[in-house]
Structure formats: C-alpha cells, structure tokens
Image (cartoon, helix red, strand yellow):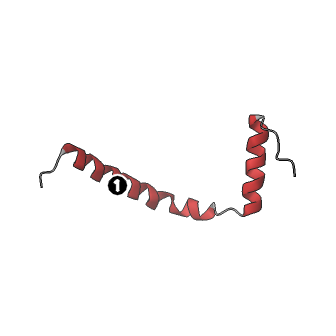
Amino acid sequence: MRRTPLDAWWDRQREKEAEERRRNAPGEARRALTRDQFERWNRQNDRRRGIAPYPF
C-alpha cells in the first residue's frame, strides 16, 4: 500500500495526541472531580451565562 501525505498527517496527529496525553495525565488525574463539584461548577457556569436554574 502506498503512503499518502494524508496518512503521514494522521500518523503525526496520533503522535501529537499521545504526547499531549502523556504531558497532561497528572493534571487530569488531579482533576477527578466529585459529582457535587461538577454540579456546582455547572450551576456557576449557567448563572454566568444567564441560564435559569432547574426548578428543583
């Protein structure tokens, strides 16, 4: 099978993604938020964007 420039591009993209995952893994592990933290973060985001809170 002939290698096309597109194949080379995809290979490079996969390398970049792997490198990014390797570099960001410790931060991602620290960012394991609880459900409460996610809900609070979502409420703050919604308030900032002017979205009314869910009625419960």
Extreme residue in the left direction: 2
Q: Is residue 1 above or below residue 54?
A: below
Residue placed at 73% from the left, 62% from the top?
A: 35
In depth, the one of 35 and 16 nearer the eye is 35
Residue placed at 54% from the left, 63% from the top?
A: 26
Q: Give the percent coordinates (x, y) of residue 15.
A: 33, 55
Q: Secondary structure at mark 1?
A: helix
Alpha-carbon neighbours of circle 1 within 10 Å: few (<14), some, or many (≥20)? few
Residue beneath disc 1 = 14
Q: Give the percent coordinates (x, y) of residue 8.
A: 23, 49
Residue placed at 68% from the left, 62% from the top?
A: 33
> How many marks are shown on the rendered structure?
1
In depth, the one of 31 and 23 nearer the eye is 31
Q: Give the percent coordinates (x, y) of residue 47.
A: 79, 40
Q: In the picture provided, is 31 more to the left or to the right than 51?
A: left
In depth, the one of 45 and 23 nearer the eye is 45
Extreme residue in the top direction: 50
Residue placed at 72% from the left, 56% from the top?
A: 38
Q: Is residue 4 above or below residue 14?
A: above
Three-letter code, disc 1: Arg
Q: In the picture provided, is 36 more to the left or to the right than 18?
A: right
Extreme residue in the right direction: 56
Quadrant of the rendering where the N terminus is positioned? bottom left
Q: Is residue 13 above or below residue 29?
A: above
Q: In the picture provided, is 47 more to the left or to the right than 56?
A: left
